[in-house]
Amino acid sequence: MEADLQRLAQAVIDGKRKDAAELTTKLLDAGCNPKDVLEKGLIAGMGVVGARFKAGEFFVPEVLVAARSMKAAMGILKPKLAGADIQPPGTIVLGTVRGDLHDIGKNLVAMMAEGAGFKVVDLGVDVTPEKFIEAAKEHNANLVGLSALLTTTMINIPDVIKAFEKDGQREKVKIIVGGAPLTQEWADKIGADGYAPDAASAVDVCKSLV
Ligand code: B1M
């Protein structure tokens, strides 16, 4: 079984969707604990993908095919996980802020976070502060992720933080920000709890905040 779990992790790393799905079915049919399939197979595989992406050894296409393989396997695993009482490390409400339609980087953050076991509520693009607050309340999120790719929309990020403060929700969530024009210094200045320059680091920051 250990060998098949390693094969599953490798199938995710290699982006082999069919292999990942077949190995997941095989492991579950053989009585493997769904938690092990998740942690030792899928999360382990995506962990390697994240590390390689961060190191510049993997690029966006490799991450996308890996995430697709993980999702194919997750489709099979999810019904079994429901009965396994597995608590995600956190719930992150994620979106690209108002006025901004760029979503490739944000989608990578979503995939990496899912790969690390987080529950991800992806609100898409052009998301208003009100929508972030509504979703955070509805899903009882402990993390909020804000992405912006334009210098003209990054300035909408502080509005979201202020809206959480005004609504009395700021203490309930950690806010992490990212996107090409952002810097750690700016994130500190606007009172964000975390900043990440890339999707893999975003997951590290999320883990450190929960
Ligand atoms: Co636009 N665009 N774009 N664009 N676009 C940029 C961003 C730009 C730099 C191009 C340029 O001029 N050189 C420029 C911004 C200039 C600026 O503000 N300084 C620009 C512009 C001006 C525009 C329009 C205004 C163009 C126009 O219409 N005149 C327009 C705006 C539309 C709008 O949003 N309202 C526009 C439109 C578009 C398309 C729709 C055509 C398309 C987006 C498609 C899509 O996303 N579905 C597009 C694209 C593709 C780009 C470029 C070419 C690529 C962006 C991208 O996806 N990068 C971009 C130029 C470039 O970067 N070379 C450009 C790949 C992605 C993996 O990286 O998004 O940085 P990135 O995400 C990284 C990190 O930033 C980080 O992790 C990710 C992965 O490692 N990250 C986070 C991102 N979000 C995070 C959140 C986190 C943590 C980390 O925590 C929550």
Image (cartoon, helix red, strand yellow):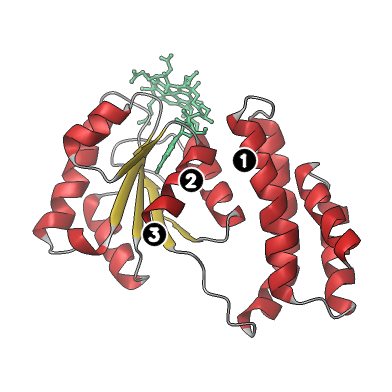
Q: How crowded is mark 1: few (under 14 residues within 10 Å), some or many (20 or more)?
A: many
Instruction: List x then y, in percent, for residue 194.
Output: 33, 43
Name the amino acid, label 2: Asp
Per the model, the C-alpha gap separating discs 3 and 2 is 10 Å
Q: Residues within 10 Å of mark 2 (few under 14, many from 20)?
A: some
Instruction: List x then y, in percent, for residue 39.
Output: 68, 63
The quadrant in which residue 135 appears is bottom left
The quadrant in which residue 122 appears is bottom left
Q: Residue 149 carries which label?
A: none
Residue 72 in sight here:
no
Q: Which mark is residue 210?
A: 3
Which is nearer the eye, 158 or 7?
Answer: 7
In the image, is residue 150 above or below residue 66? above
**Quadrant, the N terminus:** bottom right
The quadrant in which residue 75 appears is bottom right
Ligand 1 within 8 angstroms of badge 1 C-beta: no
Which residue is under mark 2?
204
Callout 3: helix, strand or loop? loop
Which is nearer the eye, 127 or 9?
Answer: 9
Per the model, the C-alpha gap separating discs 2 and 1 is 10 Å
Name the amino acid, label 3: Val
Instruction: List x then y, in percent, for residue 13.
Output: 76, 44
Give the mark nearer the N terminus: 3 vs 2: 2
Quadrant of ligand 1 in image: top left
Which residue is under mark 1?
50
Tell me if 180 is positioned left or right of 110 in this view.
left
